Protein backbone atom coordinates (compact mmCIF):
# COMPACT_ATOMS: atom_id res chain seq x y z
CA UNK A 1 0.00 0.00 0.00
CA UNK A 2 1.28 3.48 -0.93
CA UNK A 3 1.22 6.22 1.70
CA UNK A 4 1.35 9.41 -0.34
CA UNK A 5 1.28 11.71 2.69
CA UNK A 6 4.20 10.00 4.41
CA UNK A 7 7.57 11.28 3.27
CA UNK A 8 10.34 8.73 2.66
CA UNK A 9 13.28 8.55 5.02
CA UNK A 10 15.81 11.30 4.37
CA UNK A 11 19.52 10.68 4.38
CA UNK A 12 21.48 13.45 6.05
CA UNK A 13 24.80 12.21 4.69
CA UNK A 14 25.93 13.83 1.45
CA UNK A 15 28.63 11.63 -0.03
CA UNK A 16 29.34 11.27 -3.74
CA UNK A 17 32.35 9.53 -5.21
CA UNK A 18 33.36 11.23 -8.45
CA UNK A 19 35.60 9.26 -10.82
CA UNK A 20 38.90 10.80 -11.79
CA UNK A 21 39.37 12.37 -15.19
CA UNK A 22 42.58 11.71 -17.03
CA UNK A 23 43.83 15.10 -18.26
CA UNK A 24 46.55 15.52 -20.84
CA UNK A 25 48.00 19.04 -21.01
CA UNK A 26 49.65 19.82 -24.31
CA UNK A 27 52.71 22.09 -24.39
CA UNK A 28 50.73 24.46 -26.62
CA UNK A 29 48.02 24.98 -23.97
CA UNK A 30 45.37 22.64 -25.40
CA UNK A 31 43.89 19.97 -23.14
CA UNK A 32 42.44 16.47 -23.48
CA UNK A 33 39.96 15.31 -20.83
CA UNK A 34 39.31 11.56 -20.84
CA UNK A 35 36.82 9.63 -18.70
CA UNK A 36 37.40 5.92 -19.25
CA UNK A 37 34.31 3.71 -19.14
CA UNK A 38 34.88 0.16 -20.31
CA UNK A 39 31.13 -0.56 -20.37
CA UNK A 40 30.48 1.93 -23.18
CA UNK A 41 30.26 0.69 -26.77
CA UNK A 42 30.24 4.24 -28.12
CA UNK A 43 32.47 7.25 -27.65
CA UNK A 44 31.22 10.70 -26.83
CA UNK A 45 33.60 13.25 -28.31
CA UNK A 46 33.28 16.99 -27.68
CA UNK A 47 35.69 19.53 -29.12
CA UNK A 48 35.39 22.95 -27.53
CA UNK A 49 36.74 26.03 -29.26
CA UNK A 50 37.12 29.43 -27.64
CA UNK A 51 35.06 30.93 -30.41
CA UNK A 52 31.83 32.16 -28.84
CA UNK A 53 30.25 35.57 -29.20
CA UNK A 54 32.77 37.06 -26.77
CA UNK A 55 35.43 36.85 -29.51
CA UNK A 56 33.53 38.13 -32.54
CA UNK A 57 34.40 41.40 -34.25
CA UNK A 58 31.13 41.67 -36.17
CA UNK A 59 27.58 40.83 -35.12
CA UNK A 60 26.52 37.23 -35.91
CA UNK A 61 30.07 36.30 -36.93
CA UNK A 62 30.50 33.60 -34.27
CA UNK A 63 26.99 32.19 -34.62
CA UNK A 64 26.99 31.94 -38.41
CA UNK A 65 30.45 30.37 -38.42
CA UNK A 66 29.26 27.66 -36.01
CA UNK A 67 26.05 27.03 -37.98
CA UNK A 68 27.91 26.64 -41.29
CA UNK A 69 30.87 24.66 -39.98
CA UNK A 70 29.30 21.31 -40.92
CA UNK A 71 27.72 22.51 -44.19
CA UNK A 72 30.52 21.36 -46.46
CA UNK A 73 34.29 21.09 -46.82
CA UNK A 74 36.71 21.78 -49.67
CA UNK A 75 36.12 18.26 -51.01
CA UNK A 76 32.66 17.29 -49.73
CA UNK A 77 29.18 18.81 -49.75
CA UNK A 78 27.01 18.84 -46.64
CA UNK A 79 24.94 16.03 -48.16
CA UNK A 80 28.03 13.90 -48.74
CA UNK A 81 29.19 14.48 -45.17
CA UNK A 82 25.78 13.51 -43.81
CA UNK A 83 25.74 10.28 -45.82
CA UNK A 84 29.20 9.29 -44.61
CA UNK A 85 28.24 9.91 -40.98
CA UNK A 86 24.86 8.19 -41.36
CA UNK A 87 26.51 5.13 -42.88
CA UNK A 88 28.45 4.61 -39.63
CA UNK A 89 25.62 5.66 -37.30
CA UNK A 90 27.35 8.84 -36.14
CA UNK A 91 25.42 11.62 -34.45
CA UNK A 92 27.03 15.04 -34.80
CA UNK A 93 26.18 18.68 -34.23
CA UNK A 94 27.61 22.14 -33.62
CA UNK A 95 26.91 24.35 -30.61
CA UNK A 96 27.37 28.03 -29.79
CA UNK A 97 27.43 29.79 -26.44
CA UNK A 98 28.41 33.25 -25.28
CA UNK A 99 32.02 32.24 -24.63
CA UNK A 100 32.56 29.01 -26.57
CA UNK A 101 31.52 26.99 -29.58
CA UNK A 102 31.82 23.27 -30.06
CA UNK A 103 31.41 20.13 -32.11
CA UNK A 104 29.85 17.01 -30.59
CA UNK A 105 30.04 13.46 -31.93
CA UNK A 106 28.73 10.09 -30.80
CA UNK A 107 30.78 7.40 -32.53
CA UNK A 108 30.87 3.63 -32.27
CA UNK A 109 34.28 2.61 -30.98
CA UNK A 110 35.03 0.39 -33.96
CA UNK A 111 34.51 3.25 -36.43
CA UNK A 112 36.59 5.88 -34.67
CA UNK A 113 39.63 5.58 -36.95
CA UNK A 114 37.40 5.98 -40.01
CA UNK A 115 35.38 8.91 -38.66
CA UNK A 116 38.00 11.07 -37.00
CA UNK A 117 39.63 12.15 -40.29
CA UNK A 118 36.20 13.53 -41.29
CA UNK A 119 36.05 15.39 -37.97
CA UNK A 120 39.40 17.01 -38.72
CA UNK A 121 38.28 17.80 -42.27
CA UNK A 122 35.29 19.73 -40.93
CA UNK A 123 37.53 21.72 -38.58
CA UNK A 124 40.38 22.49 -40.97
CA UNK A 125 38.67 22.51 -44.38
CA UNK A 126 35.19 24.00 -43.81
CA UNK A 127 34.29 25.74 -47.08
CA UNK A 128 31.30 27.95 -46.12
CA UNK A 129 29.51 27.49 -49.47
CA UNK A 130 27.55 30.51 -50.69
CA UNK A 131 24.30 28.62 -51.27
CA UNK A 132 24.19 27.28 -47.71
CA UNK A 133 25.26 30.67 -46.35
CA UNK A 134 22.28 32.38 -48.01
CA UNK A 135 19.86 29.67 -46.83
CA UNK A 136 21.03 29.94 -43.22
CA UNK A 137 21.02 33.76 -43.36
CA UNK A 138 17.46 33.77 -44.73
CA UNK A 139 16.35 31.47 -41.92
CA UNK A 140 18.04 33.66 -39.32
CA UNK A 141 16.36 36.79 -40.70
CA UNK A 142 13.01 35.02 -40.47
CA UNK A 143 13.77 34.03 -36.89
CA UNK A 144 14.61 37.66 -36.05
CA UNK A 145 11.25 38.77 -37.42
CA UNK A 146 9.43 36.13 -35.39
CA UNK A 147 11.40 37.02 -32.25
CA UNK A 148 10.08 40.58 -32.41
CA UNK A 149 6.58 39.19 -31.96
CA UNK A 150 7.40 37.09 -28.90
CA UNK A 151 7.24 38.94 -25.61
CA UNK A 152 9.51 36.52 -23.72
CA UNK A 153 12.33 36.70 -26.27
CA UNK A 154 12.18 40.48 -26.45
CA UNK A 155 12.19 40.76 -22.67
CA UNK A 156 15.38 38.67 -22.47
CA UNK A 157 17.09 40.67 -25.21
CA UNK A 158 16.21 44.03 -23.66
CA UNK A 159 17.30 42.80 -20.22
CA UNK A 160 20.78 41.81 -21.41
CA UNK A 161 21.17 45.07 -23.29
CA UNK A 162 20.20 47.06 -20.20
CA UNK A 163 22.66 45.05 -18.12
CA UNK A 164 25.68 44.95 -20.43
CA UNK A 165 25.05 47.63 -23.01
CA UNK A 166 24.55 46.93 -26.71
CA UNK A 167 27.98 45.40 -27.31
CA UNK A 168 28.90 42.46 -29.56
CA UNK A 169 29.50 40.07 -26.67
CA UNK A 170 26.95 39.62 -23.90
CA UNK A 171 24.47 42.45 -24.47
CA UNK A 172 24.05 42.59 -28.25
CA UNK A 173 20.52 43.38 -29.45
CA UNK A 174 20.02 41.52 -32.75
CA UNK A 175 19.52 43.74 -35.79
CA UNK A 176 18.57 42.62 -39.30
CA UNK A 177 20.90 45.18 -40.88
CA UNK A 178 23.87 43.57 -39.13
CA UNK A 179 22.92 40.15 -40.48
CA UNK A 180 22.64 41.54 -44.00
CA UNK A 181 26.07 43.21 -43.65
CA UNK A 182 27.75 39.90 -42.84
CA UNK A 183 29.59 38.09 -45.64
CA UNK A 184 31.35 34.77 -46.18
CA UNK A 185 34.79 36.33 -45.82
CA UNK A 186 33.85 37.38 -42.27
CA UNK A 187 33.15 33.73 -41.45
CA UNK A 188 36.32 32.45 -43.08
CA UNK A 189 38.40 34.94 -41.13
CA UNK A 190 36.78 33.97 -37.84
CA UNK A 191 37.15 30.27 -38.69
CA UNK A 192 40.83 30.67 -39.48
CA UNK A 193 41.57 32.59 -36.28
CA UNK A 194 39.49 30.66 -33.75
CA UNK A 195 39.08 27.15 -35.20
CA UNK A 196 42.16 26.38 -37.29
CA UNK A 197 44.61 28.42 -35.21
CA UNK A 198 42.56 28.75 -32.03
CA UNK A 199 43.03 26.97 -28.71
CA UNK A 200 40.81 23.96 -28.06
CA UNK A 201 39.86 21.50 -25.36
CA UNK A 202 38.82 17.92 -26.19
CA UNK A 203 36.51 15.82 -24.00
CA UNK A 204 35.99 12.07 -24.39
CA UNK A 205 33.87 9.57 -22.49
CA UNK A 206 34.10 5.91 -23.42
CA UNK A 207 36.63 3.15 -23.87
CA UNK A 208 39.46 4.38 -26.07
CA UNK A 209 42.18 2.03 -27.22
CA UNK A 210 45.72 3.23 -26.66
CA UNK A 211 46.09 4.03 -30.37
CA UNK A 212 42.83 6.04 -30.36
CA UNK A 213 44.05 8.00 -27.35
CA UNK A 214 47.28 8.79 -29.21
CA UNK A 215 45.28 10.06 -32.20
CA UNK A 216 43.52 12.57 -29.96
CA UNK A 217 46.77 13.60 -28.27
CA UNK A 218 48.31 14.26 -31.67
CA UNK A 219 45.25 16.29 -32.65
CA UNK A 220 45.66 18.77 -29.79
CA UNK A 221 49.44 18.85 -30.22
CA UNK A 222 49.52 19.45 -33.98
CA UNK A 223 48.55 23.14 -34.12
CA UNK A 224 50.31 25.93 -32.27
CA UNK A 225 47.42 28.25 -31.34
CA UNK A 226 47.62 31.93 -32.21
CA UNK A 227 44.43 32.78 -30.33
CA UNK A 228 43.75 31.63 -26.78
CA UNK A 229 40.76 31.80 -24.48
CA UNK A 230 40.42 35.19 -22.87
CA UNK A 231 41.68 35.90 -19.41
CA UNK A 232 38.75 36.05 -17.02
CA UNK A 233 37.73 39.69 -16.62
CA UNK A 234 34.83 39.70 -14.19
CA UNK A 235 32.28 42.38 -15.05
CA UNK A 236 32.32 44.83 -12.16
CA UNK A 237 29.43 47.04 -13.26
CA UNK A 238 27.38 48.41 -10.39
CA UNK A 239 23.74 47.41 -10.22
CA UNK A 240 21.54 50.42 -10.91
CA UNK A 241 17.77 50.04 -10.81
CA UNK A 242 16.25 50.40 -14.28
CA UNK A 243 12.63 49.87 -15.27
CA UNK A 244 11.45 49.64 -18.85
CA UNK A 245 8.17 48.69 -20.47
CA UNK A 246 8.22 47.65 -24.14
CA UNK A 247 5.10 47.38 -26.26
CA UNK A 248 4.78 44.51 -28.74
CA UNK A 249 2.02 44.74 -31.32
CA UNK A 250 -0.72 42.09 -30.95
CA UNK A 251 0.89 40.52 -27.89
CA UNK A 252 -1.60 38.61 -25.73
CA UNK A 253 0.57 38.42 -22.61
CA UNK A 254 3.23 40.22 -20.63
CA UNK A 255 6.70 38.83 -20.04
CA UNK A 256 8.74 40.05 -17.13
CA UNK A 257 12.45 39.72 -16.47
CA UNK A 258 13.80 41.03 -13.18
CA UNK A 259 17.49 40.70 -12.44
CA UNK A 260 20.90 42.12 -11.64
CA UNK A 261 24.64 41.51 -11.77
CA UNK A 262 25.63 38.74 -9.37
CA UNK A 263 28.76 37.33 -7.73
CA UNK A 264 30.91 35.20 -10.03
CA UNK A 265 31.69 31.52 -9.46
CA UNK A 266 34.92 32.48 -7.70
CA UNK A 267 33.14 34.53 -5.03
CA UNK A 268 32.98 33.04 -1.54
CA UNK A 269 29.18 33.44 -1.48
CA UNK A 270 28.46 31.83 -4.84
CA UNK A 271 27.86 28.22 -3.75
CA UNK A 272 25.48 29.27 -0.99
CA UNK A 273 23.70 31.59 -3.43
CA UNK A 274 22.92 28.55 -5.59
CA UNK A 275 20.98 27.11 -2.67
CA UNK A 276 19.28 30.47 -2.07
CA UNK A 277 18.25 30.64 -5.71
CA UNK A 278 16.71 27.16 -5.51
CA UNK A 279 14.72 28.22 -2.46
CA UNK A 280 13.48 31.41 -4.12
CA UNK A 281 12.58 30.19 -7.61
CA UNK A 282 14.78 27.33 -8.70
CA UNK A 283 12.43 24.36 -8.39
CA UNK A 284 8.72 23.50 -8.39
CA UNK A 285 8.38 23.84 -4.62
CA UNK A 286 10.12 27.22 -4.50
CA UNK A 287 8.71 30.33 -2.83
CA UNK A 288 7.87 32.09 -6.10
CA UNK A 289 6.24 29.07 -7.72
CA UNK A 290 4.25 28.21 -4.60
CA UNK A 291 2.91 31.75 -4.08
CA UNK A 292 2.80 33.52 -7.45
CA UNK A 293 1.72 30.46 -9.43
CA UNK A 294 0.01 28.02 -7.08
CA UNK A 295 -1.59 30.30 -4.50
CA UNK A 296 -2.34 33.46 -6.51
CA UNK A 297 -2.73 31.89 -9.95
CA UNK A 298 -0.98 34.78 -11.71
CA UNK A 299 1.16 32.71 -14.07
CA UNK A 300 1.64 29.22 -15.50
CA UNK A 301 5.24 29.34 -14.41
CA UNK A 302 7.82 31.53 -12.71
CA UNK A 303 11.45 30.75 -12.02
CA UNK A 304 14.73 32.28 -10.94
CA UNK A 305 18.20 31.36 -12.11
CA UNK A 306 21.88 32.31 -11.99
CA UNK A 307 23.71 32.58 -15.31
CA UNK A 308 27.48 32.23 -15.08
CA UNK A 309 29.46 33.41 -18.07
CA UNK A 310 33.22 33.42 -18.23
CA UNK A 311 33.43 37.16 -17.69
CA UNK A 312 30.18 37.96 -15.89
CA UNK A 313 27.42 36.52 -13.77
CA UNK A 314 23.80 37.63 -13.40
CA UNK A 315 20.60 36.63 -11.63
CA UNK A 316 17.13 36.65 -13.21
CA UNK A 317 13.50 36.04 -12.34
CA UNK A 318 11.34 35.30 -15.38
CA UNK A 319 7.61 34.82 -15.92
CA UNK A 320 4.87 35.17 -18.51
CA UNK A 321 1.63 36.63 -17.14
CA UNK A 322 -1.71 38.05 -18.27
CA UNK A 323 -1.27 41.61 -19.61
CA UNK A 324 -3.62 42.95 -16.96
CA UNK A 325 -1.90 41.12 -14.10
CA UNK A 326 1.79 41.90 -14.56
CA UNK A 327 1.94 44.54 -11.80
CA UNK A 328 0.25 42.18 -9.36
CA UNK A 329 2.76 39.48 -10.29
CA UNK A 330 5.67 41.89 -9.84
CA UNK A 331 4.39 43.01 -6.45
CA UNK A 332 3.98 39.40 -5.33
CA UNK A 333 7.51 38.60 -6.50
CA UNK A 334 9.10 41.49 -4.62
CA UNK A 335 7.03 40.64 -1.54
CA UNK A 336 8.48 37.11 -1.41
CA UNK A 337 12.00 38.50 -1.75
CA UNK A 338 11.32 40.97 1.06
CA UNK A 339 10.01 38.18 3.30
CA UNK A 340 13.31 36.36 2.87
CA UNK A 341 15.10 39.59 3.81
CA UNK A 342 13.03 40.03 6.97
CA UNK A 343 12.11 36.55 8.20
CA UNK A 344 14.28 33.54 8.91
CA UNK A 345 13.06 30.46 6.99
CA UNK A 346 12.24 27.25 8.83
CA UNK A 347 14.65 24.36 9.02
CA UNK A 348 12.00 22.16 7.38
CA UNK A 349 11.73 24.38 4.30
CA UNK A 350 15.49 24.50 3.92
CA UNK A 351 15.71 20.72 4.33
CA UNK A 352 13.33 20.25 1.38
CA UNK A 353 15.55 22.47 -0.73
CA UNK A 354 18.63 20.54 0.34
CA UNK A 355 17.13 17.19 -0.56
CA UNK A 356 15.94 18.42 -3.96
CA UNK A 357 19.36 19.92 -4.71
CA UNK A 358 21.17 16.81 -3.56
CA UNK A 359 19.02 14.69 -5.87
CA UNK A 360 19.74 17.03 -8.76
CA UNK A 361 23.48 16.78 -8.11
CA UNK A 362 23.28 12.98 -8.02
CA UNK A 363 21.44 13.03 -11.35
CA UNK A 364 24.03 15.40 -12.82
CA UNK A 365 26.78 12.90 -11.97
CA UNK A 366 24.88 9.76 -12.99
CA UNK A 367 26.95 8.00 -15.62
CA UNK A 368 29.90 8.89 -17.80
CA UNK A 369 27.90 11.01 -20.24
CA UNK A 370 26.65 13.26 -17.46
CA UNK A 371 30.04 13.48 -15.82
CA UNK A 372 31.80 14.53 -19.02
CA UNK A 373 29.08 17.16 -19.57
CA UNK A 374 29.92 18.62 -16.17
CA UNK A 375 33.64 18.53 -16.94
CA UNK A 376 33.01 20.36 -20.21
CA UNK A 377 31.05 23.09 -18.42
CA UNK A 378 33.33 23.47 -15.41
CA UNK A 379 36.42 23.74 -17.60
CA UNK A 380 35.08 27.09 -18.81
CA UNK A 381 36.10 28.45 -15.42
CA UNK A 382 39.12 26.17 -14.94
CA UNK A 383 37.27 24.35 -12.15
CA UNK A 384 37.81 20.62 -11.59
CA UNK A 385 35.20 18.00 -10.75
CA UNK A 386 36.09 18.47 -7.08
CA UNK A 387 33.94 21.59 -7.46
CA UNK A 388 30.97 19.23 -7.09
CA UNK A 389 32.31 18.15 -3.69
CA UNK A 390 32.52 21.81 -2.67
CA UNK A 391 28.88 22.22 -3.70
CA UNK A 392 27.95 19.27 -1.51
CA UNK A 393 29.85 20.80 1.40
CA UNK A 394 27.99 24.09 0.95
CA UNK A 395 24.69 22.23 0.78
CA UNK A 396 25.37 20.33 3.99
CA UNK A 397 26.49 23.37 6.00
CA UNK A 398 24.06 26.12 4.94
CA UNK A 399 21.47 27.10 7.57
CA UNK A 400 18.54 29.55 7.95
CA UNK A 401 20.81 32.27 9.38
CA UNK A 402 22.98 32.10 6.27
CA UNK A 403 19.92 32.36 4.00
CA UNK A 404 18.81 35.51 5.83
CA UNK A 405 22.29 36.99 5.53
CA UNK A 406 22.39 36.38 1.76
CA UNK A 407 18.94 37.87 1.25
CA UNK A 408 19.89 41.06 3.06
CA UNK A 409 23.23 41.32 1.27
CA UNK A 410 22.17 40.74 -2.34
CA UNK A 411 18.43 41.23 -2.76
CA UNK A 412 17.58 44.87 -2.15
CA UNK A 413 14.74 45.84 -4.51
CA UNK A 414 16.31 49.15 -5.47
CA UNK A 415 19.15 47.61 -7.51
CA UNK A 416 17.15 45.34 -9.83
CA UNK A 417 16.76 45.80 -13.58
CA UNK A 418 13.11 45.30 -14.47
CA UNK A 419 11.89 44.66 -18.04
CA UNK A 420 8.23 44.25 -19.00
CA UNK A 421 7.16 43.44 -22.57
CA UNK A 422 3.50 43.43 -23.51
Image (tube, rainbow, N blue to C red):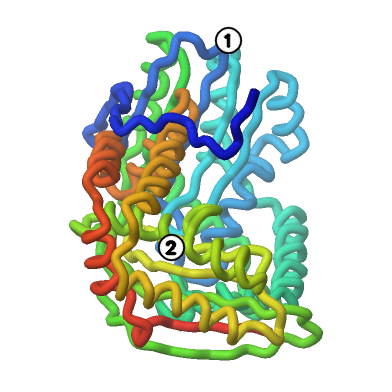
Residue 31, position as x, y percentages in the image: 31, 34
Q: Residues within 10 Å of mark 1 (few under 14, many from 20)?
A: some
Quadrant for the N terminus in the image: top right
Instruction: Pick whichever, 363 or 97, lies toward us.
Output: 363
Residue 248, position as x, y percentages in the image: 72, 86
Q: Is residue 83 above or below residue 269?
A: above
Residue 280: give its label: 2
- The secondary structure type at the circle numbered 1 is helix
How far apart are labels 2 and 1 at the CA level?
Answer: 48 Å
Q: Residue at x 27, y 54 (%)?
A: 272
Q: In the displayed structure, does residue 405 sit left or right of residue 169?
A: left
- The secondary structure type at the circle numbered 2 is helix
Q: Residues within 10 Å of mark 2 (few under 14, many from 20)?
A: many
Q: Is residue 104 above or below residue 154?
A: above
For the question of whether residue 294 can be seen, the reply is: yes
Q: Residue at x 30, y 49 (%)?
A: 381
Q: Is residue 391 above or below residue 313?
A: above
Tally of marks: 2
Q: Is residue 164 above or below residue 11?
A: below
Q: Residue at x 55, y 53 (%)?
A: 284
Q: Residue at x 26, y 66 (%)?
A: 404
Instruction: Pick whichever, 212 or 311, lies toward us.
Output: 311
Residue 263 image-quadrant placement: bottom left
Residue 110: give its label: 1
Do the numbered discs 2 and 1 sit on residues whose CB atoms are within 8 Å?
Answer: no
Amino acid sequence: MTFRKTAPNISKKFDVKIPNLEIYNSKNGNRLFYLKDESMAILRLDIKFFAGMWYQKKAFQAGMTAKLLTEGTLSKTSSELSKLFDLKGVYYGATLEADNSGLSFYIQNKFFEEIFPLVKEIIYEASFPEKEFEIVRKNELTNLQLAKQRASIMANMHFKTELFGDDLQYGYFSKEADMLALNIDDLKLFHNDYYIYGARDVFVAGNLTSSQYEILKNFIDEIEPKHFKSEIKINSNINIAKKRKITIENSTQSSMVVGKFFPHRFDDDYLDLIVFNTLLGGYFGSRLNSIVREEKGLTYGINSSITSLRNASFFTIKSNVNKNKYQEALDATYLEIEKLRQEKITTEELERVKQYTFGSLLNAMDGSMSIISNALYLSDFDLGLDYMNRRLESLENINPDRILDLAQKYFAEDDFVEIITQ
